[in-house]
Amino acid sequence: MPAITVDNVLSLPRLEHPAPGSQPRPVQQVLTALTTFEGEGFQVRRAFPSPSLRGADPFILLDHLGAVEYAPGEAKGAPDHPHRGFETVTYIIDGAIEHRDSTGGGGTITDGATQWMTAGAGIVHSEMPPEYLVRAGGLFHGVQLWVNLPRAEKWAPPRYQDLESTELSLATTDDGGALVRVIAGHLGALAGPGSTYTPIVYAHATLQPGAELSIPWPHDFTAMAYSLAGHGRAGPSGKDAVITEGRLAVFGSGDHVVLRAGDRQATATPTLELLLLGGRPIHEPVVQYGPFVMNSRDEIVQAIEDYQAGRMGVIPPRSAF
């Protein structure tokens, strides 16, 4: 798992401790991601939306892609398709994906980098494996998160952020048992490089066997932890729950979150790998139709008409990139 790391984690800044009297967040529910298919037919594990968690305000969707070892010719992607009304955040842990869009944006995301695309008023883009991955096969592992935009920002001009792994903010616990990489938002003094319209926290944490992570969390934000690999427990003792790969822990209210890695991990996945995410709820109506997320049915109809009329643009020929 080539997400950004350091040779000596104890050289990193220390994570803040919960304040005296801080209340830990209990785990309200643990959900197992559902298996479905996207794009040209690649398999994903969808943590939400699901029958058990339809709303995760301010988030719309969380898809876990892989980890999968593609044979030659097997790698698939998502050809040209539109979006409006939200942001897509694609974090690639292993392998690579090529992004191209109707604004002329493009690039290859790989090994711990993040593509942050604000669809806003409307964009057409594609996410495809590079030619070398299709030809030779190889390991692919990534995550895509959809972040809703408030009504006032749904018509913002599209934009694209290319966040290299070296730009992420890193910190560790006092004993060096956990490494946290902040992609966006603030965790105490740590600030991620992602620029967001909707206030959120998005981070990737690695916990060594037996390690505990107790970290302050904005009290007005939702809080969730999704296991990419490994196993452990989420929540304070007595109000905790087991989490394993492909499971999402949803926390209740409080001031900090507590996570612990199991004392023994599998050889293939020697650490507990977690996505930490949450944000300030928008509390606005959500009407979704496939790749469009708006506030009303009329706005969805308009999005479909605008896309069909070509008003969201066309991806330029590859020679233009």
Image (cartoon, rainbow, N blue to C red):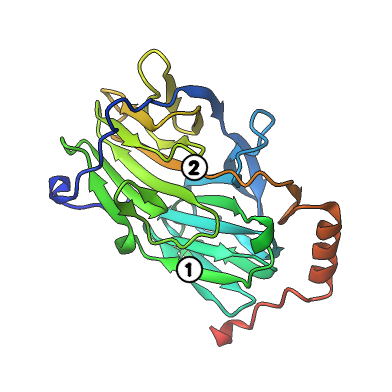
Q: CA distance from mark 1 to mark 2?
A: 20 Å
Q: Tell me which residue sits at (70%, 64%) in the image.
A: 81
- Residue picked out by circle 1: 161
User: What's the amino acid at mark 2?
Assistant: Gly
Crowd rating for badge 1 (residues with CA inside 10 Å; few <14, some 14–19, many 20+) = some
Crowd rating for badge 2 (residues with CA inside 10 Å; few <14, some 14–19, many 20+) = many
- Identity of the residue furthest to the bottom in this view: 320
Kindly tell me whether residue 62 is visible in this rendering: yes
User: What's the amino acid at mark 1?
Assistant: Gln
Q: Is residue 264 left or right of residue 202?
A: left
Q: Tell me which residue sits at (37%, 56%) in the image.
A: 192
The spot of residue 100 in percent (x, y) is 57, 72
Q: Nearer the viewer, residue 10 or 281?
A: 281
Establish if 124 lies above or below 258.
below
The spot of residue 80 in percent (x, y) is 68, 67
Check residue 278 in the rendering and tell me which mark sits there, or answer none: 2
Q: Which circle's residue, 1 or 2, is located before the other in the chain? A: 1
- Identity of the residue furthest to the front in this view: 21
Q: Tell me which residue sits at (32%, 36%) in the image.
A: 215
Q: Tell me which residue sits at (84%, 64%) in the image.
A: 302
SS type, badge 2: strand
- Identity of the residue furthest to the top in this view: 238
The spot of residue 307 in percent (x, y) is 79, 69
Q: Nearer the viewer, residue 278 or 206?
A: 278
